[in-house]
Image (cartoon, helix red, strand yellow):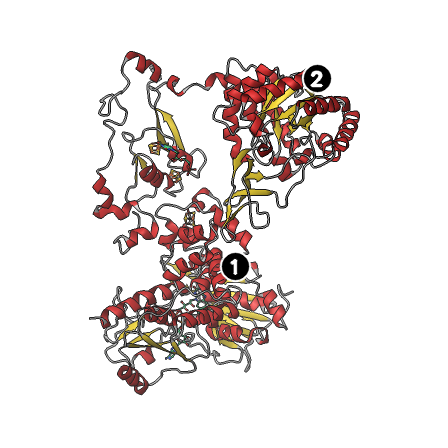
């Protein structure tokens, strides 16, 4: 029996993918905000990559000043609403809340954050406006958390901003990658519309920048170029049978899921390859789409998985089964996926060793590879003098985001190698200030 | 099993818990329901010439997520015809002969006082409570607190009542006065059998920020009301104590004000009350709270070995002294239990900004440290600490010396001049004023303020 029956309507999809952190009502927000101790030099602030003044906004909520609370949040993080829902708060702000040390449930900071910001978004309350036009222009490539955050901050500083985005919608992986039970498409896009209405940057969708000629044009037309391009497709495994039908990359699978929801079909028995957070998401999502058996196969031991514990718990909670210390050798099947041939492994001195003769085939009808996203090295090679590190990450000044090509600045996954929405949002704010400093010289 | 029953100035009741004269005692229906639930007595909603009330009538004070920490009303006395009330008193007494039914009264002329006392006596009331307390609506008509604030008038009315009363007379006092013992003494002089206190405190519980009007709002306007509920307990306790300690009052006291559970009741009793009355808590949670009150009181009496309520009345009074009689040699110092500390640093900021700069933060830990030489033993840190028993105040004097202010004055060792060497704060260390604006100042400010004040990045562990 499957944990979930296959959703066939929007309604059923919404039920299977019910929000983990639903928006609070006023009463819940009042009760929860009442618990905050208003710590001195609060550890939750330090644990927030965007440094939101958490006790301040919680106190504002408690005193009935939701608008002020939202302003406090947005001043530090333009993805304030999304972050409240998608941040791994368990390991960030909420993980640092002093209540943990008292073995009392930490303050639900994320949900309070979404509460205040949802209020201003829904009432379309104007909190910000563009600064005095300074006559300078910046091109932003990528409308993800990094690109949109940079656009907001640059508008605040008076720049004219054009955002170029390959896809049809803004917010990057927030709407194409994050699990649907964390945030809905509507919520994500409402925040994007709210920001654009206030800051007034120009967006150009379905406008991938792909050639040297296009880049040269941007270099001519704009005073600076911001790279918020994130990462690329799922890494190839280079295994025999990888091209079989129903063997797909996790990022591609999830992007489909976010866009087409219940119309996306999933196998009866799904094997997810990987041990990171994306693997956990893909496994949970397969289960919620009605797969009867979902197997999470990882090369190393359970304890060695890169995923956060709470993400693994979430997957286990919807019936996902772990299969550890197995390395895939081949995707079997005749045209369609029919199984994965694994070999058992053991970890010795931190290295994975295959155990000779331990091969076996685990039957399945779908394989999702959650084996990391490739870097956009090909595209980045089109930018003269741009240096990448050994892992394909853009090298940039940690205080300004300026790359080795002074006209180019970077933030987000393309710079940090793949982190969270909040990191991209925080970095982009810093980088926008870096651009301002550079162009004000 | 301890005996909860009381004999209060001749009024007998199966337990010391009475409903105060207020909406919960508006009708026979409510009083019977309350007795059935376990209440020992009820002071009927004040009888007199029936009034007309306004709508709306109540306002509340909420603290964070807690509702009705304070409560206020602009209601008057009973709006029901006297005969209806008296008939129902009679009915209640028939069904509950062993419970206390006390008629609360408020009228104007001597004749009216005589009439109403006689009539309620005939209805079977076990006693009377003269309402000299209501601080709104009735006082403007020369009744309620207008009487309670004029000891002479109060005494005269008590005398009128005593002329006809054959049952015990309780005088209910208003706290809207600078010295509560004055009206209490007047009640005694007039011949009253007991006093009860406090009635409500004149108040405005809040202002509507959009309508620019005080709560409760009546057609866009409001008026001052009477304040009660948990918030007024400390004021009530002090007044009960003042009356109980006064050598000339010597009347049984019915304690009222902020009683919501058995603990509150015991506090009133330890300070001298021999019955207690409850209004707001019954209005907030209904009559059912009585079960927790009686069971808690019983348990406490068992644990302390008290057999009767009288055993505990006034038990705390010998320990309530005048300030000048406190031992100035006694010294406590704050102590942080590091194993319990959760690192919220509320104690730090409280002492730093609100007390004596006697707590410091150290690099590499969030657990603050007490600077013992600076600690004056004020308790503030232990009061703000959110963890039970984490900051304790430990005695640091030898425990062998005793010296009071009074003794110092008598011995001539009390400071008397502006620059007196004998003063307490004379050599007490305080930081130089300019330190407040020094380079390091961000370290004493919370959260974002640190960043605004020049620190670009908050250090990993301050
Ligand atoms: C499956 C998955 C789940 C995740 N779950 C979470 C989560 O729960 N919580 C969380 O905080 N983070 C999560 N993340 C991480 C988070 O989504 C990213 O860290 C964040 O979106 C990075 O923002 P970014 O702006 O750097 O890149 P992206 O969000 O990837 O945005 C880059 C944008 O640039 C566009 N683009 C790229 N190249 C070009 C080009 N040449 N021309 C024009 N446009 C271009 C892309 O189409 C995209 O819209 C998840 C990531 C994945 C893959
Ligand atoms: C510890 C302490 C000491 C006080 N000392 C004084 C004082 O010296 N002079 C004064 O006018 N009021 C003094 N007050 C009263 C306060 O100024 C204020 O009127 C009262 O606390 C009510 O305000 P609050 O509810 O904000 O505390 C003191 C209050 C506290 C708590
Ligand atoms: S650590 Fe927790 S209690 Fe302290 S300020 Fe932050 S959210 Fe509030
Ligand atoms: S208030 Fe209590 S818990 Fe908080 S830092 Fe001080 S001692 Fe620790
Ligand atoms: S008792 Fe008072 S002076 Fe001493 S450390 Fe605590 S707050 Fe400071």
Q: Position of residue A161 (x, y in %)?
A: 34, 76
Compared to residue A230, the image places residue B46 above or below, namely above
Circle 1 residues within 10 Å: few <14, some 14–19, many ≥20: some
Mark 1 = which residue?
A21
Q: Position of residue B34 (x, y in %)?
A: 71, 32
Q: Nearer the viewer, residue A217 or B417?
A: B417
* Left or right of B397 in this view: A340: right
Quadrant hosting residue B340: top left
Q: Is residue A32 in sight in this rendering?
A: yes
Mark 2 = which residue?
B164
Q: Which element type, helix, strand or loop, lies under badge 1?
A: loop
Circle 2 residues within 10 Å: few <14, some 14–19, many ≥20: some
Compared to residue A23, the image places residue B432 above or below, namely above
Q: Residue at x 58, y 22 (%)?
A: B154
Q: Quadrant of the C terminus of chain A?
A: bottom left
Q: Nearer the viewer, residue A233 or B126?
A: B126
């Amino acid at each position: 029996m499957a944990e979930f029956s296959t959703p066939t309507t929007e309604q059923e999809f919404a039920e299977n993918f019910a929000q983990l952190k639903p928006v609070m009502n006023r009463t819940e927000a009042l009760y929860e905000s009442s618990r905050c101790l208003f710590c001195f030099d609060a550890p939750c602030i330090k644990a927030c990559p965007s440094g939101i003044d958490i006790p301040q906004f919680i106190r504002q909520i408690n005193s009935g000043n939701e608008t002020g609370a939202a302003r406090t949040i947005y001043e530090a993080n333009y993805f304030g609403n999304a972050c409240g829902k998608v941040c791994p708060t368990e390991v960030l702000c909420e993980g640092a809340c002093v209540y943990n040390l008292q073995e009392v449930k930490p303050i639900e900071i994320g949900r309070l954050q979404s509460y205040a910001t949802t209020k201003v978004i829904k009432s379309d309350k104007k909190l910000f406006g563009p600064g005095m036009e300074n006559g300078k222009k910046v091109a932003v490539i990528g409308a993800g958390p990094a690109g949109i955050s940079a656009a907001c901050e640059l508008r605040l500083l008076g720049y004219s901003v054009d955002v170029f985005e390959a896809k049809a919608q803004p917010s990057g992986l927030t709407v194409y990658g994050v699990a649907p039970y964390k945030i809905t498409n509507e919520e994500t896009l409402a925040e994007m519309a709210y920001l654009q209405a206030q800051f007034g940057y120009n967006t150009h969708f379905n406008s991938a920048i792909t050639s040297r000629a296009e880049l040269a044009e941007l270099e001519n037309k704009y005073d600076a170029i911001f790279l918020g391009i994130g990462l690329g497709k799922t890494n190839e495994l280079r295994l025999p049978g990888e091209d079989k039908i129903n063997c797909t990359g996790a990022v591609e699978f999830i992007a489909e899921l976010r866009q087409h929801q219940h119309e996306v079909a999933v196998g009866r028995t799904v094997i997810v390859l990987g041990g990171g957070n994306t693997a956990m998401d893909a496994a949970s999502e397969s289960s919620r789409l009605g797969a009867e058996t979902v197997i999470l196969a990882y090369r190393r031991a359970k304890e060695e998985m890169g995923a956060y514990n709470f993400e693994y718990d979430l997957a286990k909670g919807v019936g996902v089964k772990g299969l550890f210390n197995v390395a895939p050798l081949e995707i079997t099947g005749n045209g369609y996926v029919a199984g994965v041939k694994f070999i058992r492994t053991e970890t010795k001195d931190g290295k994975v060793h295959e155990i000779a003769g331990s091969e076996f085939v685990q039957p399945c009808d779908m394989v999702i590879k959650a084996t990391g996203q490739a870097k956009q090295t090909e595209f980045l090679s089109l930018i003269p003098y741009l240096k990448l590190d050994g892992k394909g990450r853009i090298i940039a000044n940690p205080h300004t985001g300026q790359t080795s090509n002074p006209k180019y600045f970077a933030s987000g996954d393309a710079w940090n190698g793949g982190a969270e929405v909040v990191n991209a949002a925080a970095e982009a704010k810093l980088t926008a200030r870096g651009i301002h400093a550079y162009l004000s010289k | 099993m301890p005996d909860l029953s009381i004999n209060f100035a001749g009024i007998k009741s199966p337990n010391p818990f009475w409903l105060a004269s207020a909406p919960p005692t508006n009708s026979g229906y409510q009083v019977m329901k309350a007795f059935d639930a376990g209440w020992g007595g009820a002071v009927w909603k004040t009888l007199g010439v029936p009034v007309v009330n306004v709508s709306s009538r109540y306002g509340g004070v909420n603290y964070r997520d807690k509702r009705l920490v304070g409560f206020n009303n602009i209601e008057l006395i009973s709006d029901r015809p006297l005969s209806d009330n008296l008939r129902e008193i009679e009915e209640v007494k028939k069904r509950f002969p062993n419970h206390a039914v006390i008629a609360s009264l408020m009228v104007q002329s001597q004749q009216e006082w005589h009439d109403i006392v006689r009539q309620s006596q005939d209805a079977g009331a076990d006693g009377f409570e003269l309402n000299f307390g209501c601080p709104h609506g009735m006082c403007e008509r020369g009744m309620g607190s207008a009487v309670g604030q004029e000891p002479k008038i109060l005494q005269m009315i008590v005398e009128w009542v005593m002329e006809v009363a054959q049952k015990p007379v309780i005088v209910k006092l208003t706290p809207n006065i600078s010295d509560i013992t004055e009206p209490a003494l007047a009640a005694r002089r007039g011949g009253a059998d007991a006093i009860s206190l406090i009635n409500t405190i004149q108040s405005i519980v809040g202002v509507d920020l959009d309508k620019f009007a005080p709560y409760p709002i009546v057609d866009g306007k409001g008026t001052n009301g009477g304040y009660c509920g948990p918030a007024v307990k400390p004021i009530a306790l002090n007044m009960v104590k003042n009356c109980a300690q006064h050598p000339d009052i010597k009347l049984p006291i019915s304690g009222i004000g902020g009683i919501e559970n058995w603990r509150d009741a015991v506090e009133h009793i330890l300070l001298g009350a021999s019955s207690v009355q409850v209004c707001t808590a019954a209005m907030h949670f209904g009559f059912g709270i009585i079960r927790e009150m009686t069971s808690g009181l019983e348990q406490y009496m068992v644990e302390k070995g008290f057999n009767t309520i009288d055993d505990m009345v006034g038990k705390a009074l010998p320990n309530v002294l005048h300030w000048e009689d406190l031992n100035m040699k006694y010294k406590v110092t704050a102590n942080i239990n590091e194993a319990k500390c959760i690192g919220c640093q509320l104690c730090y900021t409280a002492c730093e900004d609100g007390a004596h700069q006697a707590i410091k933060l150290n690099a590499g830990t969030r657990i603050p440290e007490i600077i013992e030489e600076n600690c004056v033993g004020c308790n503030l840190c232990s009061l703000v600490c959110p963890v039970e028993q984490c900051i304790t105040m430990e005695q640091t004097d030898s425990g062998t010396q005793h010296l009071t202010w009074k003794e110092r004055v008598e011995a001539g060792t009390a400071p008397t001049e502006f620059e007196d060497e004998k003063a307490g704060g004379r050599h007490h260390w305080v930081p130089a004023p300019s330190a407040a604006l020094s380079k390091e100042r961000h370290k004493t400010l919370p959260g974002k303020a640190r960043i605004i004040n020049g620190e670009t990045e908050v250090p990993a562990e301050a």
